[in-house]
Amino acid sequence: MPYTGDKFCCDCFDKRKSSASKYHYENIFKRNWGLYFIPVVRDALLISNGIKCLDFPGGNIYHVYIRGRHEKWSKNEKGANNMQKCDECSNFVSNYYKLEEYE
């Protein structure tokens, strides 16, 4: 069972995703897109979504449901000089998924 902050390489995340009972991803900028036509609301949405992008780079939230547990993952990309260790297989990778929160 992963903990908040754990990093999985793409292969380990795909294994976890395939064993899930349900999986989907959302883009936070495409959600509630009709509200962007209202000037004051648009500004508030852009600010709040910009803050969320600090946790979810690229604006994508990957939802994985395993045994009744809802996990929110973000996909991160680092350069070759800043590789991260996968917590599942212990390989060092530049593209990885990070567990941001779970319920």
Image (cartoon, grey):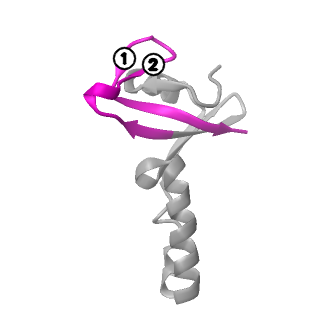
Q: Earlier in the sequence, mark 1 or mark 2?
A: 2
User: What kind of element bears circle 2?
Assistant: loop
**Residue 21, quarter of the rendered image:** top right
Residue 65, image x, y percentages = 63, 35
Mark 1 and mark 2 in contact? Answer it, CB < 8 Å: yes
In the picture, the quarter occupied by the N terminus is top right
Q: Amino acid at mark 1?
A: Phe
In the picture, the quarter occupied by the C terminus is top right
Query: Which residue in the structure is indicated by mark 1?
Result: 92
Farthest residue to the top: give it: 90
- Residue span colored magenta: 74-103
**Is residue 72 left or right of 56 when viewed as pictured?**
right
At a point 28% along the width and 26% down the height, the residue shown is: 81
Residue 63, image x, y percentages = 56, 42
Q: Is residue 1 magenta?
A: no
**Residue 23, quarter of the rendered image:** top right
Residue 57, image x, y percentages = 44, 48
| Label 2: how many Cα within 10 Å (few below 14, some 14–19, many 20+) | many
Q: Is residue 97 magenta?
A: yes
At a point 36% along the width and 17% down the height, the residue shown is: 92
Is 99 or 25 nearer to us in this picture?
99
Residue 86 numbered tag: 2
| Label 1: how many Cα within 10 Å (few below 14, some 14–19, many 20+) | some
Is residue 32 visible in the rendered image? The answer is no
Is residue 100 visible in the rendered image? The answer is yes
Is 100 rendered above or below residue 2?
A: below
Is 4 or 37 nearer to us in this picture?
4
Q: Amino acid at mark 2?
A: Cys
At a point 43% along the width and 27% down the height, the residue shown is: 14
